[in-house]
Image (spheres, rainbow, N blue to C red):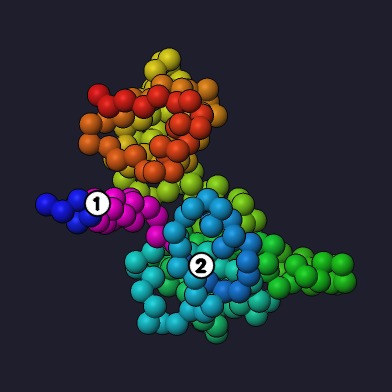
Amino acid sequence: MDTNILIDRVVKEVIKRIESSSPKIMLIGKGELAGEELGRAAICHTCCEGYSDDMPIDDYDFIIIRGMSIFELVSSALLVPGTNVSKLILKGRLTGKKIYVEKDSMEYKKYESTIDRGLEKQLEHYEDCLKSYGIKMLKAQEIIKDINDNGVNDNSKNEESSRDDCKSRDQCRLDKKLITEQDLRRLAQQGHKTIQISKGSIVTPLARDFMKTNNMSLFKE
């Protein structure tokens, strides 16, 4: 078989495995912070300026809403489908989607120095309503951290068990199908240098670069 064809097949298979094991994220609305943080964290996501009823939200694990307007906040809190965002929130929570609102980009936050205190309290009350529906109101960096900590891929339980192993042994075992730079960075921060992985595990190129740069040893069982 031609070497180039073989390399192409391997690359496609690795990409396929990475995509299947990564959380699917929909980024809705206008704003730069969450998108920039997702880019820095090398997390794949789909950007959409707005939401429409025909958009396949079932394909996504997480939904991040940027630039929420005052009208969108009020209608969403009151469960009134008067805006596309309030429709998205209602449908998303009915189907169990994890939804975040980027707090810093909310419209009313721009008026903190001039807003009437009574009005501000009312809008904060509407925020609390959204929180009671299971929606998280966080800053961009906090959203990314929460997604990383509570990812929905099949490896989450294995990651937790590997942390326990690492705490009790000099040699750390990482029981995952796909080993990423983020996995090795977390272990390096805990002081681990020698990592044991499963025979069928795939190590991403960025993870290999991180391993070399940080003098980490990786071997398969």
Q: Against 108, is 13 above or below?
A: above
In this view, the residue farthest toward the right is 114
Instruction: Report the quarter where the C terminus lies.
Output: top left
Dividing the picture into quarters, in which one does residue 135 lie?
bottom right
Tell me where the magenta segment starts and ends, as one range: 7-25
Q: Residue at x 31, y 45 (%)?
A: 154
Whether residue 157 appears in this view of the structure is no
- Regarding mark 1 in the picture, which secondary structure is present there? helix
Q: Against 54, is 64 above or below?
A: above
Residue 158, horizontal then vertical, whole percent: 34, 35
Label 2 sits on residue = 27
In this view, the residue farthest toward the left is 1
Q: Against 156, is 57 above or below?
A: below
Along the line of sight, the residue nearer the viewer: 62 or 134: 62
Dividing the picture into quarters, in which one does residue 46 lie?
bottom left
Residue 55, horizontal then vertical, whole percent: 39, 78
Q: Is residue 21 left or right of residue 137?
A: left
Q: Is residue 158 magenta?
A: no
Q: Residue at x 65, y 80 (%)?
A: 71
Q: Is residue 159 left or right of residue 2?
A: right
How many numbered discs, if any? 2
Along the line of sight, the residue nearer the viewer: 24 or 37: 37
Amino acid, disc 1: Ile
Q: Is residue 148 left or right of residue 203?
A: right
Amino acid, disc 2: Leu
Distance of label 1 from label 2 (alpha carbons): 33 Å
Crowding near the residue tagged with mark 1, few <14, some 14–19, many ≥20 C-alpha atoms within 10 Å: few
Mostly what secondary structure, the magenta segment?
A: helix
Whether residue 26 appears in this view of the structure is yes
Label 1 sits on residue = 7
